[in-house]
Image (cartoon, rainbow, N blue to C red):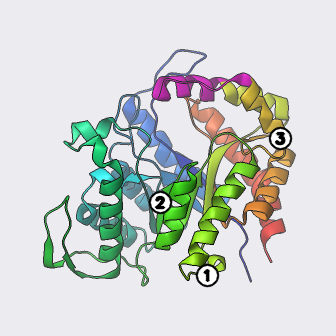
Amino acid sequence: MSTGLELGLYTLGEHVVNPHTKQLITPQERIKNIIEMAQLAEQAGFDIFQVGESHQRNFISQAHLIILSAIAQSTKTIRLASGATIIGVADPVRVYEAASTIDLLSDGRMELVCGRSARTGLYKTLGFELADYEVLFNEKFELLKLINQREIVNWTGEHRAPLNNVPVLPRALQKQGLPIWRAVGGSLESAKQAGQAGDPIYVSHFSGDLKHYQLLIDQYRQSLNHEGFEPSQYPLAVASYLFVRPDTSQAIDDYYPFVNEGSITVNEQGIERNQFEKAKNLDSVINVGSPELVVEKLIKQYEELGMTRYIGQIDFGGMPFEEVKRTITLLGEKVLPEVKKYTTK
């Protein structure tokens, strides 16, 4: 019997002012709020909690795996994942060592989502050439997957010292190794490459409609099939904005200022109000609205995209933690039970 669509929450760990009060909480308070957010998500019935990695101003998630290790010790059942680890500028050996340690601490609940990063300042900081953006990701990601499969590693590449009969320890508790996902944005080419490699994908989208993402996922599944993989055997994770209030207009009014001002701060580009208003439409991937609307949209996305996991971002843009807690409560009481009921076979 299927347990239905997996539902989770994630945070990028941005650290920005509240657009209404212009107040900024301390980095310590922001990190502690993230840990408590994961605890509340577990209590509300969510399946997974993810923490992103960013290395620039206005973030506190530079050491995201350390935050996840703290969450591992303060939770019991909820699965944990990065969202995403910037593998191209990391050492896959060190990433695996840290993630497998979290897997041991959490009794086998750890996963990795690996991506390239939309914010590229870290390349200069760590001494990498931005021109090597693609080759760094491909080489490091393949090495990480190899390490996950083999305790003793032999490997040679261009952007890291070779590994000759090197034991990479500790090993993950999960017998099949750590679940490792490949992060994909809106690029059809990225989806095609993931399918060619046989990688499970984690698709993040923040605006637009289902049609574009259906094309992207179709491209991915066609590539899987072309390479001899069975698409139906591959999980599919989708992530987007998620926010509920009793009334859809209230939900949009409440979340928009945080999303817009937060985007201006971290991406230097806001989101137009009329674009965010499209959340009222069933075909919009912005899952913001009343519990009833969000349930209907998640079910539609489940049916049309064939996703096996959905992860929502509820805390973006300096959202006061009391409002984050309110959102988790509403989701746990009004959304999760209905989505689980529909998707459980």
- Name the amino acid type tagged 2: Ala
For residue 290, which numbered disc appears in the image? 3
Tell me if I can see residue 75 in this picture.
Answer: no
- Circle 1 — which element? loop
Q: Amino acid at mark 3?
A: Ser
Residue with the mark numbered 2: 81
Q: Nearer the viewer, mark 2 or mark 1?
A: 1
Amino acid type at image mark 1: Glu
| Farthest residue, direction front | 226
Q: Which residues are magenta?
A: 257-273
Quadrant for the N terminus, please.
bottom right
User: How far separated are the C-alphas under marks 2 and 3?
Assistant: 28 Å
Alpha carbon separation for disc pair 3 and 1 = 37 Å
Residue under the point 55% across and 83% down: 228
Labelled pair 3, 1 in contact (Cβ < 8 Å): no
What secondary structure is the stretch in magenta mostly built from?
helix
Q: Left or right? Give the position of 323 relative to 133.
A: right
Residue count near mark 1 (Cα–Cα under 10 Å), binned few <14, some 14–19, many ≥20: few
Residue holding disc 1? 230
- Asked whether 274 or 241 is in front, the reply is 274
In-image side of 64 versus 327 (left or right): left
Residue at image position (32%, 76%) is 146
In this rendering, position of residue 220 left or right of residue 29: right
What is the x, y in percent for residue 265? 48, 23
